[in-house]
Amino acid sequence: MRLIIEGVGKTYKGGAAALSDFNLELGPGVLGLLGPNGAGKSTLMRILATITKPTVGRVVWNGEDVTRNPNPLRSVLGYLPQDFGVYPNLSAVEFLEYLAAVKGVPAGVARKRIGELLDLVNLTEARKRPLGGYSGGMKQRVGIAQALLNDPRVLIVDEPTVGLDPEERVRFRNLLSDLSGERIVILSTHIVSDVEATATDIAVIDHGRLVAHASPEQLLQSVEGRVWEWVVPSAELAAAKERWLISGTMRRGDGVHLRAVTAAPPDSLAVAAQPSLEDAYLDRVSEARERRAA
């Protein structure tokens, strides 16, 4: 089970390049696709979901070129887009029955599957209420359920925790981890903590280019010994941000506690800190931007 992205680029009308020479090979597990807003994550997700065709390059699913023949991937695909819409007058059960029919899931199988999924996303008690009365988080959970209707081998979720409260976010992270055994799960987000909790593999994207692809442990090792913490007066905060890559700030009575990624100690009183995935992510994005500027 392999999903291969080979030299994929996407240029929109007017010449705006959303992706450039993107290469990635995926197997079972959870890939966390991290990048700032506008980095090209959603464009890549739409290409992988066979909604958008790349301008150049190709996507290969188990040896089959998806651009030429998307059906083998579509038959095993689950997709939760960033902007997921519902029919407000339908109940969750009715909506999922409709989508199951669209996906070709037999009615008997669909009924059993829908019951299991509504229980999984904690919507059993609200299953007969019209979706128009659901909160944003509840609608997002219906979206998660619909993506799982056909028991997909490839599951693509684009910014899935937007609108979820902290408890729902933890539940969704646990769900992704549980699903990852024999599936390729692609989680696209700009929230580092979502990736930190679930991903077995991480890809960092910026300005449409892949700038890092590694395990969480490898990314953390890349900033080992280069993360520092120290305290500055509030008046010096702006200057510090100009000079160093600041990955965290916290105001206290004695001043602003800063966290930065830099090779040398930024201050004589700076102490080495344990690296976080956010430190590593910001370091890779900053490094890529410096290369572009050069």
Image (spheres, rainbow, N blue to C red):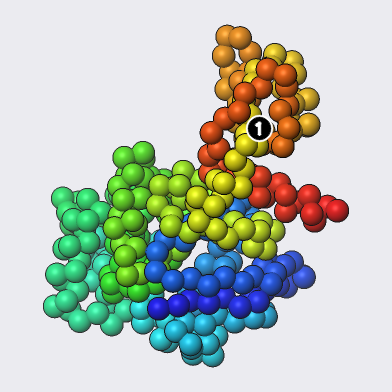
x then y, percent, for residue 102: 32, 79
Residue occupying the point 72% across, 67% down: 17
Which residue is outermost to the top?
A: 253
x then y, percent, for residue 91: 23, 60
Residue occupying the point 19% across, 74% down: 110
Left or right: 97 in relation to 184: left
Q: Viewer-proximal residue, 173 or 13? A: 173
**Quarter of image, res 78:** bottom left
Residue 132 seen: no
Q: Dot 1: what SS? A: strand
Left or right: 25 in relation to 165: right
Give the residue number, with chain letter if any, for mark 1: 260
In this rendering, the answer to whether 247 lies above or below 118 is above
Residue occupying the point 47% across, 82% down: 61
**Quarter of image, res 109:** bottom left
Q: Quadrant of the N terminus?
A: bottom left
